[in-house]
Image (tube, grey):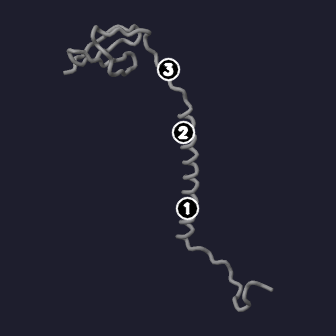
C-alpha cells in the first residue's frame, strides 16, 4: 500500500520565489561566515593565551632613599618607577632600567 492518498494528484515541485532564493542564499552565506568567525576566534585565543610573556628585567638591587618604603612599582621601556612613602610624604622615584641610577624624583602633594 501507498502512504499517499489516491485522491491527491502528483504535484510537480514548486519553484521558490526569487526573494526566498535570495534569503536562502543569505542564510547560507551567514552560516559560513559565522563558522569561519568562530574558528578565527578560537585560533586567536589559543595562540595568544599560550604565548609566554617577556621576562621582567630589573637590576639586582634598587637603592631607595633613607626612610622611604615602597608602595607601588611600574615599568616603562627604558625606565622603572617606584612609588614610595615616608614621613615627609609620598614620592615617585624614576630609575634608569639599564644602570639602576635615579633619573628623577617627583614629590606627590
Q: Nearer the viewer, mark 1 or mark 2?
A: 2
Q: Nearer the viewer, residue 7 or 62?
A: 62
Dot 1 crowding, Cα within 10 Å, few <14, some 14–19, many 20+: few
CA distance separating discs 3 and 2: 21 Å
Which residue extends farthest left?
109
Look at 57% across and 40% down and name the residue there.
43
Residue that mark 2 sits on: 45
Residue that mark 3 sits on: 55
Q: Earlier in the sequence, mark 3 or mark 2?
A: 2
Q: Where residue 27 is drawn, which disc sits there?
A: 1
Rendering coords of residue 25 (x, y %):
57, 62
Q: Nearer the viewer, mark 1 or mark 3?
A: 3
Rendering coords of residue 18 (x, y %):
55, 71
Q: Earlier in the sequence, mark 1 or mark 2?
A: 1
Which residue extends farthest bottom?
7
Rendering coords of residue 10 (x, y %):
71, 85
Amino acid at each position: 500500500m501507498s502512504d499517499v492518498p489516491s485522491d491527491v494528484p502528483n504535484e510537480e515541485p514548486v519553484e521558490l520565489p526569487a526573494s526566498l532564493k535570495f534569503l536562502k542564499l543569505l542564510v547560507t552565506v551567514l552560516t559560513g561566515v559565522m563558522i569561519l568567525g568562530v574558528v578565527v576566534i578560537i585560533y586567536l585565543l589559543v595562540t595568544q593565551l599560550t604565548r609566554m610573556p617577556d621576562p621582567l628585567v630589573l637590576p639586582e638591587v634598587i637603592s631607595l632613599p633613607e626612610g622611604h618604603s615602597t608602595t607601588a612599582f611600574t615599568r616603562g621601556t627604558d625606565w622603572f618607577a617606584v612609588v614610595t612613602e615616608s614621613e615627609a610624604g609620598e614620592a615617585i622615584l624614576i630609575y634608569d632600567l639599564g644602570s639602576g641610577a635615579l633619573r628623577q624624583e617627583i614629590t606627590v602633594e
